[in-house]
Amino acid sequence: MSRDLIIGIDAGTSVIKSVAFDLAGRQLAVASVPNRYTTDTNGAVTQSLAQTWQDCVTSMAQLAGMLPDLAGRTAAIAVTGQGDGTWLVGSNNQPVGDGWLWLDARAGSVAQAMRDTDADKARFLSTGTGLNACQQGVQLTHMMDIAPDQLAQAEVAFHCKDWLYLNLTGVRATDPSEACFTFGDFRTRSYSDEVIGFYGLGDHAQLLPPICDGSKTTHALTDEAAARTGLRAGTPVVLGYVDVVCSALGAGAYQAHHPVGCTIVGTTGVHIRATAPEDIVLNAEQRTGYVMIMPVEDVAAHLQTNMASTLNLDWVRGLVGEVAGTLGAEVTEDQLLTLMNDWIATAKPASLLYHPYISDAGERGPFIDHTARSSFIGLTSAHGFGDLMRATAEGLGLAARDCYAAMGQTPNEVRLTGGAARSRTLRDIFSAALGVPVRQSLREEAGAAGAAMMAAVTIGAYEDMAHCLADWVTPLLGESETPDHELTALYDRLFPNYTAARKALQPVWHGLAHREDL
């Protein structure tokens, strides 16, 4: 049997997936293992490196059980994963403690202090990325104070996908997208000595791994990794770009000569415009957002990201489940989702205002404030649970509008991906809030697909990414869904109140955070 498929690995925050695609982009099988991380009251969110690799191996073994002769058919493997965070590795490529995830809030005050310096302006103009507690540079700086012994044992600082790539290939590397938005210059696609120096890491700057561009380079699956995964030693392995970039690529964020946007309605909310680097207008006053290199020549993704998107819906859904459990009722996940959609669809639009800042780490787009918190505004005794549910969904749509506004004009069309994008009601809210047509990406596993697309081009299955997009992306875009003009007009009137309220509440958030510190 010929080598006719590519395995895309996506190590996300919620699950680790191994997905098999044929060379034309058809998804053949998917295996997933729930991700596991630990939270602490001090804001720490950490994950075992060893367990993460084992979970990745497990997902690949499950995939092998679904497809005959997976080892013989695999033309390439590509890996992507959750971004930001710090995964330290020491001698003999062994983990040094648990990895700090992007959800970790411990370095929030450090990030704020760095943002308040004049030097941060130059760092921002180089990276295009606003500084926050998620990022490796800030976390390494904080580790110098609270975990110096751990840093002393480390030889390299990875991100999640880099750790998996090391286990697959034995190569210590990171990708251009993650390297440059943290420590580099998106125009040169390389590290910047000035940006690295900004963090004052001293000798710890040597922890940064070499940059490996998976759109041009592969490394071979090692004998040891082959024995663990059941695949063939020597199989080409591609280091994908960070999961946001791969998801955007797989969902259709880039289309040559056509200004489209892409919103990922996932654990976080990610709002993307793909454009030439010279056309990116940075939010220099607020210094927020990200610029991430894409695996397409002379194209970068300009992003604003909400710290929490579906986390808000999960919170409301959890409340329903908690009440039902207290009353001795059993409510299935499907029943909860049906209830949520019904509540959102039948509640009166714009009757409440909700800011979706429910993450313990605060907010990072289009403003950065680790003390930001969610709130409902306008409650009366006439409001019911459905109104809260509707307001939560509308808050996500208005947050998307807030983010696109910070990047300039909203694109002519926005592609939606992520589990929540399957809801027509939610898509209608996003379309009306943004005031432009939306198209749902029907690609089930956009992140794994984006990584696999990189591999398809790198191994020569496609001449270039444009030809790959024509097969892998375009056929899986749903019909254009135009906004309801009356609803758009309603959200047009609501949006100024949304932004005014979040600005007015900022000193309240700061006061509440001070109370928590007492």
Image (tube, grey):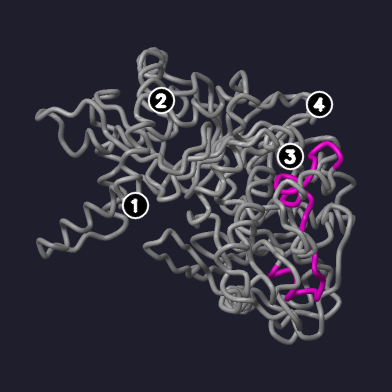
**Residue 413, quarter of the rendered image:** top right
Give percent across and percent down for residue 179.
Answer: 75, 51
Distance (Cα) linking label 3 and label 1: 32 Å
Disc 4 marks a residue whose amino acid type is Glu
Mark 3: which secondary structure?
Answer: helix
Task: Tell me which numbered mark, 3 or 1, is placed earlier along the sequence.
Answer: 3
Task: Tell me which numbered mark, 1 or 4, is placed earlier along the sequence.
Answer: 4
Distance (Cα) linking label 3 and label 2: 26 Å
Number of residues whose C-alpha sits closer than 10 Å to that of mark 4, classed few (under 14), some (14–19) or many (20 or more)? few
Q: Determine which of the numbered discs, if any, sits on residue 278 in the image.
A: 4
Task: Tell me which numbered mark, 4 or 3, is placed earlier along the sequence.
Answer: 3
Disc 3 marks a residue whose amino acid type is Thr
Distance (Cα) linking label 2 and label 1: 22 Å
Relative to 33, is 254 above or below? Answer: above
Q: Look at the image and say whether residue 126 sits in the magenta stretch.
A: no
Disc 2 marks a residue whose amino acid type is Lys
Distance (Cα) linking label 2 and label 4: 31 Å
Residue at the spot of label 1: 517
Distance (Cα) linking label 1 and label 4: 44 Å
Q: Determine which of the numbered discs, if any, sits on residue 503 in the image.
A: 2
Task: Work out whether residue 82 can be spotted.
Answer: no
Location of the N terminus by quadrant is bottom right
